[in-house]
Image (cartoon, grey):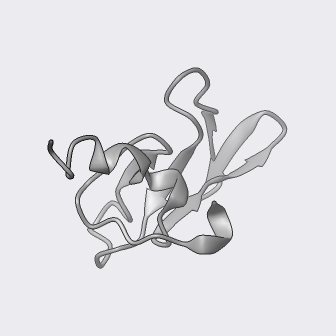
């Protein structure tokens, strides 16, 4: 029996303390005063991963269902 099988199934960006959902205004996700379509469907909401320092283009864009390996559980998001 493998104790680590499917261990990462709960380690999604949606439950990570480093994930910040982009604010939604009028059906758009607002980021730096630019309107982009809100992600819908199985990927979840669009957000930013704030785990590492931002690059020249800002923090990396991620979806709620993404996983990177740096996940740190935030009990307030469960």
Question: For the point 15% across and 45% down, which residue is it?
Answer: 2
Rendered view: 37 above or below 9: above
* Quadrant assignment for the N terminus: top left
Q: 62 or 31: nearer the eye?
A: 62
Q: Is residue 72 left or right of residue 53?
A: right
Question: For the point 59% across and 40% down, which residue is it?
Answer: 45
The quarter holding residue 36 reads top right
Q: Is residue 40 left or right of residue 25?
A: left
Q: Position of residue 47 (x, y in %)?
A: 52, 52
Rendered view: 9 above or below 19: above
Q: Is residue 13 left or right of residue 76?
A: left
* Quadrant assignment for the C terminus: bottom right
View extreme (top): residue: 41
The quarter holding residue 18 reads bottom left
Question: For the point 46% across and 70% down, which residue is it?
Answer: 73
View extreme (bottom): residue: 53
Rendered view: 20 above or below 17: above
Q: How many marks?
A: 0
View extreme (front): residue: 1
View extreme (right): residue: 26
Q: Position of residue 57 (x, y in %)?
A: 33, 60
């Amino acid at each position: 029996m493998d104790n680590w099988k499917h261990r990462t199934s709960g380690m999604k960006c949606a439950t990570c303390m480093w994930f910040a959902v982009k604010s939604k205004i009028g059906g758009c996700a607002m980021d730096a005063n630019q309107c982009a379509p809100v992600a819908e469907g199985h990927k979840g909401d669009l957000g930013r991963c704030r785990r590492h320092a931002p690059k020249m283009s800002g923090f990396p864009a991620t979806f709620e269902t993404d996983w990177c390996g740096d996940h740190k559980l935030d009990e307030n998001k469960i």
